[in-house]
Amino acid sequence: MDVPLTPLEFARRARRIYPKREAVVDGALRLNYAQFLDRCDRWSAALQELGVAHGDRVVVISPNTHSMLEQFYAVPQLGAIVVPLNYRLTGADFKYMIEHCTPTVVCAHADYIDTLEALRPELSGVRHFVALTGGAPGWLDYEATLAAHPPQFRRPEIAEDDVLSINYTSGTTSRPKGVMITHRNAWANTVGSLMHNPMQVGERYLWTLPMFHANGWTFTWTVTAAGGTHVCIAKVDAAAVYAQVNRESVTMLCAAPTVLIGIANGPEEGRRTLRRGVRVITAGAPPAAATIKRVEGELGWVVTQMYGLTETAPMILVCEMRPEDAALSADERAAHKARQGVELISSGELKVVDEHDNEVPADGATLGEIVVRGNVVMKGYYKDPQASATALRGGWFHTGDAAVVHPDGYVEIRDRFKDVIISGGENISSIELEGVLLAHPAVMEAAVVGMAHEKWGETPVAHVVLRAGAQASEEQLRLHCRERLAGFKVPSAVHFVNELPKTATGKIQKYVLRKQQSAIHRQ
Amino acid sequence: MDVPLTPLEFARRARRIYPKREAVVDGALRLNYAQFLDRCDRWSAALQELGVAHGDRVVVISPNTHSMLEQFYAVPQLGAIVVPLNYRLTGADFKYMIEHCTPTVVCAHADYIDTLEALRPELSGVRHFVALTGGAPGWLDYEATLAAHPPQFRRPEIAEDDVLSINYTSGTTSRPKGVMITHRNAWANTVGSLMHNPMQVGERYLWTLPMFHANGWTFTWTVTAAGGTHVCIAKVDAAAVYAQVNRESVTMLCAAPTVLIGIANGPEEGRRTLRRGVRVITAGAPPAAATIKRVEGELGWVVTQMYGLTETAPMILVCEMRPEDAALSADERAAHKARQGVELISSGELKVVDEHDNEVPADGATLGEIVVRGNVVMKGYYKDPQASATALRGGWFHTGDAAVVHPDGYVEIRDRFKDVIISGGENISSIELEGVLLAHPAVMEAAVVGMAHEKWGETPVAHVVLRAGAQASEEQLRLHCRERLAGFKVPSAVHFVNELPKTATGKIQKYVLRKQQSAIHRQ
């Protein structure tokens, strides 16, 4: 006697079981689950009246606020599709994605209204613009519209294979693609997260990760499933994070490695009084062992690495600790945790394959591509059957990530295939090299990319941000690498920079570094 | 890109990720996951050669051994249906169920071969009898047959709505009914268990609960999903449990309340040296607060109560602890834990309804019937469309359990509806009355049933087993009840007995007590 698998089920349960528990903290606003879900229902009623029907798209552009979170419930419970855009993109990006997904309604935070207002004449297909905060002429006021509607609406039949969200990929190499995540995809991912990162009732989750990023790695629903509290934060810098963690007794957060580096290197007096034991899930890019060691050693937090992609809803690997790992030293533990790990219980099947689709040997050395199938794999790319067919060829999603399998079965990512540096016929993993650089006490951030080389084809070049007050010369860092790596892996040059170019989700934009290098080279 | 939800997926993952971890301990035999699943594959190959095809039934009658556990993998991965029978039933029961489900193959442990051999002339439809241990002329030898087959077989397509097992109900009031559990039902229940009772890699689970009982409350697959070890035990008495818990460093077990009472009252010297911190899941009947307090206080174990039925695969409620519960005293904590709790995250929707299908108020007093819908609810009763339609009427499974809902949303079972005693128009919960009796220091077990009464319609009668060496008179126990309960609830008689009649799963057979009472009354 099946009912559809959908994260909306977690909201139904939370309303029933946890009506008076705190659901959301956002500045001075505190909502319990009854209040929060009542607001979602009112907004569903308003959207329905605005003409949003089953299958329609609703775009939302907002940082992590309570009204952003509400879209992840109010829109899907109409059978409509929530499309959270990366708010750090440009107006031209917004225009491309809005024209691509043709939403009925666009909702935006005050900070993005001007940009959208400028685009508005060209976006004639959008029937309503909604100001989640702030406002402008011709924009509906979110709070007033919500308040004007009773919390009743016609609940449509929702099938588990209906699309719940469209999440645009970051599009570093091509136009962004719209990943279609179904209700079943999101449900399976939430359940997988909870089996591997058990959450208790009363858990307090800090929203350091943008919600637009693969639906906040599904925590938009996971926190609700567990009866936890969504704690918003206006600005993700180390001092603000420390303050909010202490003030709100935060127990858990998610952060990409570059964000973690920032948090780990916050003001020392803040670190001393910081709440210990916070569980951190990191994903989005491979963290260096040095970063993990620093977060665990300096902050007293506990890091779990997971791996996934927008196309897999997102989590598909978890670096699970085993009883025998209790005996590891801090260094060994960090090195262990820097691997991406093993399949989640619910995620489906994951293999690392060579170009003939054969699994690579579990030797910790042979590079292959990660491919996945299962219930977390997207339905496809929106309006792009060809890209969908290519990515999902043979019934497996091809991630484009180059990885090795260790003898103990743990998968470790060595690079995006396109970022592997091939020097004199040898593969060099930029991630391995970055890990070595980050182990140097003066190095805060590092990114390695290949540069064309007459003799070797390519040669690795490092871009390094030093820790505040620390010093190191190019020769010192090359020596540091030479002592730890085969000679052909030592960077041929080290560029010292003040910051690295990053995507909104904290991923380093290596294509920008490559462009800068070419420019330097041409000069 | 969906793949079927099936617990077979946990075996695939365990083989890939945990090949060398210990899967099963059974006496002197120790199998890692590679060995264990290799054996399952060999047995699948043998069964396939014996003619077992998709949809066929394979009956198994065995205590908790490695070969019993193997049936829960080897049979379903053929698309066939495993039918584990309650081995404590009689030959006539076996005959009824075998004739009802018409299996291709019957597998039995040595202890049941004589009984089945006597029935064999009447079971002409069964093509093969297999001796899991021991043997008899005309019976296939399990180990020899398994060893003679390579671990390859044709893997059929399995749909998630295919039937995985048929589990016969205990049939205290009617002929046993065959509950059809699908692959999706079992998968959803396993996932639910793991979210609420997180298990680590290396967990060591003791098989005190019979595997035939709703597939061992799904732990036949849950332990494998978590990469834990299935630890078998030949005999479930307190001394043997203590010894095995210590010898095998057991971390978790399941037990019905009556079994828990036995374990909690084991030899004192054994309790002193017993491993602490073992997590216990109890279900199958409501445990008294006194039992929970004793297990937690005397053994230092941690009890979680869950609730379910064979028809719900089985778990649908969990008595989840909340942060504020940390402040409870031992007595309050035990009383809290004696309630059945709240919906599991993945189980589906649960309501307590009156005769008009309206939810009862959450006042901790109004009795209603528990009804459930969702992905753990069975496909129906095998070959019994009428009973299926009745049980699943209106799209909800009707449990027949009478419960109240507390103001905090926690559900507490008061009785099977048929066991509610109605005295002078007032409902008396036999479970409430038993809870009060069990709080008396001399009482080890108690069962209360109604007896016909000229004036009141019915009146409660208690059947009590005293603790070894303890003494109490009928008048003392009635006084103990009078001090704690409304006058009409005080038992009109107390019968002292040496043991209570129980089903194989530890449920007290109240219909037997009623028969005995009638017999006494007629004398």
Image: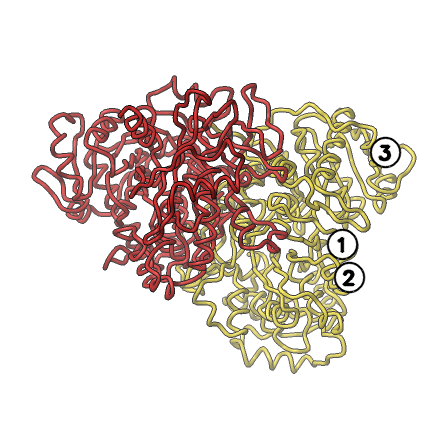
Chain colours: A red, B yellow
Which residue type does callout 3 highlight? Ala
Q: Is residue A147 above or below residue B519?
A: above
- Disc number at residue B479? none
Q: Decide if residue A85 is in sight here.
A: yes
Q: Are marks 2 and 1 on the same chain?
A: yes
Alpha carbons under labels 2 and 1: distance apart: 8 Å
Alpha carbons under labels 1 and 3: distance apart: 24 Å
The residue sitting at the right extreme is B137
**B215 or B496, which lies in front?**
B215
Q: Is residue B321 above or below residue A453?
A: below
- Disc number at residue B144? 3
The residue sitting at the left extreme is A137
The residue located at (28%, 47%) in the rendering is A64
Q: Which residue is denoted by mark 1 in the rendering?
A: B233
Which residue type does callout 1 highlight? Ile
Q: Which residue is denoted by mark 2 in the rendering?
A: B240
Density class for disc 1 (Cα within 10 Å; few <14, some 14-19, many ≥20) is: many
Q: Are marks 1 and 3 on the same chain?
A: yes
Which residue type does callout 2 highlight? Ala
**B378 or A98, which lies in front?**
A98
